[in-house]
Structure formats: structure tokens, C-alpha cells
Image: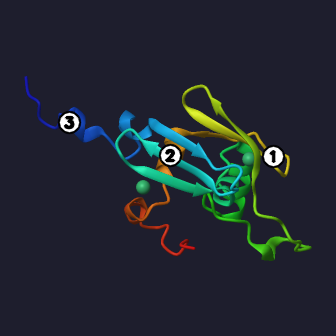
Amino acid sequence: MSHEGIRFVAKGEQETETTLPRIAVTPQKVRVLLSEGKGVEIDWSDGHRSAWSFAWLRAACPCATCVEERKQEGRKPGQPKSKATELLPMYTPPAKPLSAQAVGRYAIQFNWQDGHGGGIYSWEYLRRMCQCQECGFAREETAGAVN
Ligand SMILES: [Zn+2]
Ligand SMILES: [Zn+2]
């Protein structure tokens, strides 16, 4: 019996960056700054802290319609629609939800002022989209999206 040509991969090696440790996607504290109109802050169980503005969250809506729309326009999650693509540019007030609610233990959902509300933002999705500098550098290619 020969093991020639067969490579045994240790379990750890197979892990890709698509797997986040549970502790990194478990929020310890979630603050939805609704009245301030600011955004969402999460303290994660691994000690990391993330924050997103409502405008960013609205433009990162993970519902099928928005995902498809972003794909067609070549936008990244959180990247606002370019004004140039609108035929009649109108003033749009910054996105703000009327309310937010937890979805089970794994996600949060917003009821946006503009009537939209189908997007379910899982903790994992949000953690992956952490806006802090550290995570931004780790994702590299978001450079240039700095406000
Ligand atoms: Zn959506
Ligand atoms: Zn981060």
C-alpha cells in the first residue's frame, strides 16, 4: 500500500477565511443608536468592537433584491449608489431605520424609513464587514472607501 500522490491535510489547514470562530460572531452587546440616528455598535465576545452607520447598513442590505442590484452596478456592500446613475438626482435624507429587531439569536433586521426592510443582517455578515481600521487593512481592497 502506498500513499503516493495523496496529500493528507491536517484539519486546521483546510480552514479558509470563510470560517470565523464562533466567539468572533457572537455579540456581547448590541447598541442600536436609533434616536441619535447614528448607527449600530457591537461589542463581540472576542473583545473586538465594530460600528456601522445607518447609511452604510442601508447600502449593505443583504436582501436578494439589494444584493442583485449591487452586483449589477458593481458596488460593494455599504457603497452608496452613485448619483450619476440616477436620472433625476433628488435630495435623499440619510438612511435611518424606524425600528430594529433581533432575528432569532443570529441576526438583526431594520425597518427603514424608506419602507424597505427585507434584509436580515446576520452577526457573521456584520463582523465580516467590520469598519474598523484593523479589519479594513485585513480586507485590503476596501481602501479608497474611507470617508
Ligand atoms: Zn434590501
Ligand atoms: Zn474590526
- Tell me which amino acid carries mark 2: Ile
- Quadrant of ligand 2: it is bottom left
How far apart are the alpha carbons under marks 3 and 2? 36 Å
Residue 137 location, quadrant: bottom left
* Residue 61 drawn above or below residue 80: above
In this view, the residue farthest toward the right is: 88
- Disc 1 marks a residue whose amino acid type is His
Q: In this view, does 11 lie to the left or right of 64?
A: left
> Label 3, on which residue?
9
Label 1 CB sits under 8 Å from any ligand 1 atom: yes
**For the residues bearing labels 2 and 1, Cβ distance under 8 angstroms:** no
Evaluate if marks 3 and 1 touch, with contact meaning CB atoms under 8 Å apart. no
Front: mark 3 or 1: 1
Residue 129, image x and y in percent?
51, 53
The answer to whether mark 2 is within 8 Å of ligand 2 is no
- The amino acid type of the residue labelled 3 equals Val
Q: Distance between the residues labelled 2 and 1?
A: 23 Å
Asked if the residue under mark 2 is in contact with the one under mark 3, i.e. CB atoms within 8 Å, the reply is no
Nearer the camera: disc 3 or disc 2:
2
Q: What element carries label 1?
A: loop
Q: How crowded is mark 1: few (under 14 residues within 10 Å), some or many (20 or more)?
A: few
Q: Nearer the viewer, residue 140 or 106?
A: 106
In this image, 59 relative to 25: left or right? right
Q: Name the residue under label 2.
A: 42
